[in-house]
Image (cartoon, helix red, strand yellow):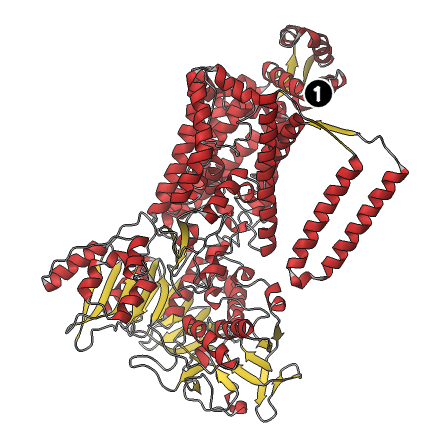
Amino acid sequence: MKFLKLTGIALFLVALATLISLPLLSRLSLTPDKITALSALVGTDKQEAATKALNAFKGDHPKIPALMGLEQQLKKAKWDSYSSDDFLFQVSREAGAGFFWENKTLVAWLILLGAIGGGLLFILPDFILTKPGIHHNGMYQNPATNAGWVGILAAVFLISFYILLYFNHFLITEWIAIADPFSMALRGELASQWFMYGFLYTLAIVVMGVRMIMKYRHSNYHLIRTGSIIFFQICFAFLLPQIFYVLHLPEDDLKNIWPLNYYFFFDWNIAKHIDSGTFGVFMLVWGITLAAVGVPLLTYFFGKRWYCSWVCGCGGLAETLGDPYRQLSDKSTEAWQIERVLIHGVLAFAVVMTGLTLYTYFTHNSLKWTINPYIFVGVIWAAAVSLFAYYRYRNPAQNGYKVLATLASIAGLITIWVFADIFPMEKASLRFTSYDIRTLYGFGVGSIFAGVVGTGFYPVMGNRVWCRFGCPLAAYLGIIQRFKSRFRITTNGGQCISCGNCSTYCEMGIDVRAYAQKGENIVRSSCVGCGVCAAVCPRGVLALEVGPEVGRI
Amino acid sequence: MHIVIIGNGIAGITTARHVRKLSDHTLTVISGETEHFFSRTALMYIYMGHMRYKDTKPYEDFFWKKNRIDLVFDQVNAIVPDRKVLKMASGKEISYDKLVLATGSRPNTFGWPGENLTGVQGMVSKQDLDQLEALTPTIRHAVVAGGGLIGIELAEMLHSRGIPVTFLVREKSFWKNVLPPEESAMVNAEILLHGIDLRLGEEIASITGDADGRVQAVVTKSGTTIDCQFVGITAGVSPNLDLAQSAGVETRRGFLVNELLETSVPGIYAIGDCAELREVLPGRKNVEAVWYTGKLMGPVLAKTLCGTPTAYQQTTWFNSAKFFEIEYQIYGEIAPEPSEGVAHLAWFHLNGKHAIRIAYRKQNGQVLGFHLMGVRYRQAVCTHWIEQGTHIEEVLQNLGAANFDPEFFTQYEQAVLDAYAEASGVTLTLRRRRGWKQVLATLSLK
């Protein structure tokens, strides 16, 4: 068995190392023919710059430096980053050379099989060898699961992956090309970075879902729940959109609900749906109905879990790939306070952003604001400091900070006021429109928070970083769960022994024990109903239940 | 008034928290074990890597200052009741107006030759855990002696770290004086299934050590020698009475207390594992060294300390444990063998992982207790039936209301009814499956 595990991890690591090395080992081979062909791909206004840049890298070069050099050239030619990234991705695909590009399909299959097979070979023996039941042995002694060096390396890898995916996908063309065979089969075209991402995402959920099934094979709740996650990921998130694409319909993930799906009400998305005819309009109605009726109704009857730990893709990844990291979520009161401010802040941001977007959509009035930067900075400073002071004031052990924070706040405002006086700037020096707010949300929340931070930090901050601190839909579902729902975690009388397994393994960082040891039921807006607290409890104290609202809290 | 509590376990801390809820008295909690309160029941999970020490602390460190509970990390050497002063190991003196002894218990030893060797220890304190952790790299084989709850937990702990364990149980079956024979046999099987070398009817005769004073082997009463580098002594616990003499309080097994939990010296109280009740309900023990007792006594003693003398009354018995993968819960009175006039209705799953046993009075059908293995039942519902003296057939027809297993789990209530039909010839219909409405209806809350 030990041999199997070693073979498994070796296979997995070789596959991973090969994957990482692919872009580094590939070459860029720009023949005159290719330069002509590639230049023809861009609009006439850009052709000259494209030809010039490509010619500067004529011949054979190591790929990454060449692409980065090309990017500089295009930047000099004042290309916007979207066109530049897109063009460079095509260059990278068309002019890629080296072992990988000559044996693409073979290498793709070898890497995938190595990673999946090796991964399962490494993971499964531990579960097959142990009896069904909860086994968290060694979690805090293993550097992979106690935020030790393996965890940190994994986090670095995930964070880098997301940054490259969102902002420099042309540098990882080889990774994207791994998904080519599947994209060809499903869509009849080469893979885009988003196809590759969806493909790997689904793969991660399936493989780690198998692990979940093995780990919780004694519990029907977890078996059914994990089955549901895998089903919704494969069918709704991955396959259906491909079918829609082939049918020339908008590639919607029908279970991705506003405000998690923040671009649902964007003008281009609405236009795309209306242009697609009846089914497109149905998709719009479906999305609005889910958000306005489905969410409150289902949450009333089943709690937030019907979405967060049974259906949602983000939740699905957290429950499968993220399961080994669930114990790393911070349980402190401090973390809870930060969580409440952040997640409800994002919800407010999403609502305001969507409101402005819709206002602009219906009135064709792209709202413009102009503000004095000093006032802007001043307000943010004051808000930040008040928040800090408020928080510290709530925690009597830290009373000294209240005075400090107040002083700092006054000093800061005076400084801004003085500087504003010394360097008078024209009043209206910061201009932005509703469109800019939308872009800011997409970048700040959609990419950085949900992807880079939300998933990248799994191995060090627990598997629900995004769901807990950032997801606006989780905040919306949570408000309903807290105030109008039949769902609760019931505490079984006085049987709690305060051991702390429930709190430790709560991925949402809820201090479950704090309620259980008082004999109180747990009704918290953040609870996603994964049921792990009830599973790890060694005394049978906790149970997820839906029942009358009487005596719920 | 200055209330001083010696011991920061569940009993002492519960008392402190409730005194603070009721009053503004000055409060000091002294412990020589750890700086902060932690859950003793979770020691095993630290060793097994499920949790870190800090995860076993039920309250964050700021809690104590916020609630003005002074923590003193020091050992009490002696109590001077005449001057109402504690002499500390650090040389300091702490004066008190009222004193609470919550000193807990310590592992029983039996004067075996070699019991003081390095590597021979119990598993009740943080120090025990730290010592075991330090020894672990050198342990190639371990012996655990004593077939109770701590014994099986210690066996599971060592097993989780890949250490082969020989488990010596004096009785002919595991925890035989508490568990009914069939349930006890289930646990025996579970222990063997996990690869533990279970030796029933075996005890330590002597322990031998090497030249450095480290344990080398255990010789059993049957004459077998077992080479080992660690011996876990888990043959029960006894109240920790170190301070009894200087305090001048009357003791028997524990500090003797009246119904107000006050010792023979006015102003000195005892609570939890170390307290021995002078009078108890029939069938109950004078020392109930379990987590729940400390937790139940705390709020009562707090009232007395804060000026409202309140008698501690034993409530319907309950307890719980986990034997490897088999969870155990008990509510009410249920002896290993049915006593005179009592019948046991028992159902066992063929896979040996689930069992439900209900005790009731033959004469009037009154339900007395529930004994559950691998099944979770609701305390509120079971206790309600026991306290109301509900008839067994009424209980059985509503048995679903007691079910507390997770959703989608197999429900065994019908099987229990079938077992009753087989035993008594009375076929009943299960009126209720699990669910909250049923619970509320049973408790007449709705």
Query: Is residue A396 positioned above or below B252 on the image?
Result: above
Q: Is residue A461 rendered to the left or right of residue B117?
A: right
Query: Is residue A406 positioned above or below B313 on the image?
Result: above
Badge 1: residue crowd in 10 Å (few <14, some 14–19, many ≥20): some
Residue B327 rendering spot, x and y as whole percentages: 34, 60
Residue B90 rendering spot, x and y as whole percentages: 65, 81
Query: Is residue A317 positioned above or below A500 on the image?
Result: above
Q: Is residue A143 rendered to the left or right of residue B258?
A: right
Residue A377 rendering spot, x and y as whole percentages: 76, 40
Q: What kind of residue is marked 1?
A: Glu
Which image quarter holds the C terminus of chain B? bottom left
Image point 31% across, 71% down: which residue? B175
Q: Is residue A114 visible?
A: no
Q: Is residue B162 rendered to the left or right of residue A443?
A: left
Image point 17% across, 63% down: which residue? B393
Q: Is residue A244 visible?
A: yes
Query: Which residue lies under the disc numbered 1?
Result: A71
> Which residue is outermost to the left?
B425
Q: Helix or strand or loop: what does disc 1 sit on?
A: helix
Query: Is residue A418 positioned above or below B47 on the image?
Result: above
Chain under callout 1: A
Residue B310 rendering spot, x and y as whole percentages: 44, 81
